[in-house]
Image: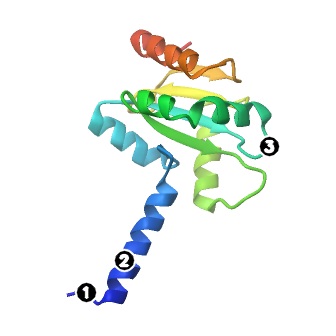
């Protein structure tokens, strides 16, 4: 039997782990996202963003990526992954290294970049910048990309 203090400590640790792993439907752990996508038969939607310095990134998040209508729709077919490149704020060394490696591997040259991949991480759609004005236009792009499943 666990003591009340051990129970509370265990719950706090579990809550902290979940809070860092998933923020509003998004995860930052690329390998865990791939495993989840494989298990659930989904693709990955990866958002390469500069959350604290990039005006188009901020607009994309505010107007589309943080909206319940987007998240509820996208999560039917995608595991959502945010790879942030902030100029301020705290990120672990491991997270910074993961994000830097993935940006290099996927040849990311602009922020924001939305990358759609299969569960193995093979890209089939790349969108640089923020050409979307509404959740509906973004969701339409996702639907077309999934049906085409080819890199553009």
Q: Residue at x 78, y 37 (%)?
A: 54
The residue lying furthest to the front in this view is 68
Q: Position of residue 110 (x, y in %)?
A: 73, 29
Neighbor class of circle 1 (other Cα within 10 Å; few <14, some 14-19, many 20+) is few
In terms of secondary structure, where does tag 2 sit? helix
> Contact (CB < 8 A) between labels 2 and 1?
yes
| Residue designated by label 2 | 10
Residue bearing mark 1: 2
- Write the residue at 29% across / 30% down: 41
Structural crowding at the residue carrying mark 3, measured as other residues with C-alpha within 10 Å and reported as few (<14), some (14–19) or many (≥20): few
Labelled pair 3, 1 in contact (Cβ < 8 Å): no
Q: CA distance from mark 2 to mark 1?
A: 10 Å
Determine the residue positioned at 42% across, 27% down.
Answer: 73
Q: Position of residue 93 (x, y in %)?
A: 63, 61
Left or right, 32 with respect to 64, comes to left
Q: Position of residue 151 (x, y in %)?
A: 52, 15
* Position above or below: 25 against 65: below
Q: Residue tagged by mark 3?
A: 53
**Residue 59, how many percent across, how many down?**
71, 32
């Amino acid at each position: 039997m666990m003591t009340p203090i051990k129970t509370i400590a265990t719950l706090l640790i579990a809550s902290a782990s979940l809070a860092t792993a998933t923020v509003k439907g998004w995860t930052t752990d690329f390998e865990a996202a791939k495993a989840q996508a494989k298990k659930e038969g989904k693709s990955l939607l990866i958002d390469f963003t500069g959350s604290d310095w990039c005006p188009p990134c901020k607009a994309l998040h505010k107007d589309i990526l943080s909206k319940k209508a987007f998240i509820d729709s996208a999560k039917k077919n995608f595991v959502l992954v945010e790879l942030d490149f902030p100029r301020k704020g705290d990120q672990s060394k491991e997270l910074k290294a993961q994000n830097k490696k993935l940006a290099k591997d996927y040849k990311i040259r602009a922020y924001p970049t939305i990358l759609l991949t299969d569960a193995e991480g093979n890209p089939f759609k790349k969108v640089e910048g923020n050409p979307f004005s509404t959740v509906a236009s973004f969701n339409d792009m996702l639907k077309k990309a999934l049906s085409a499943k080819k890199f553009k």
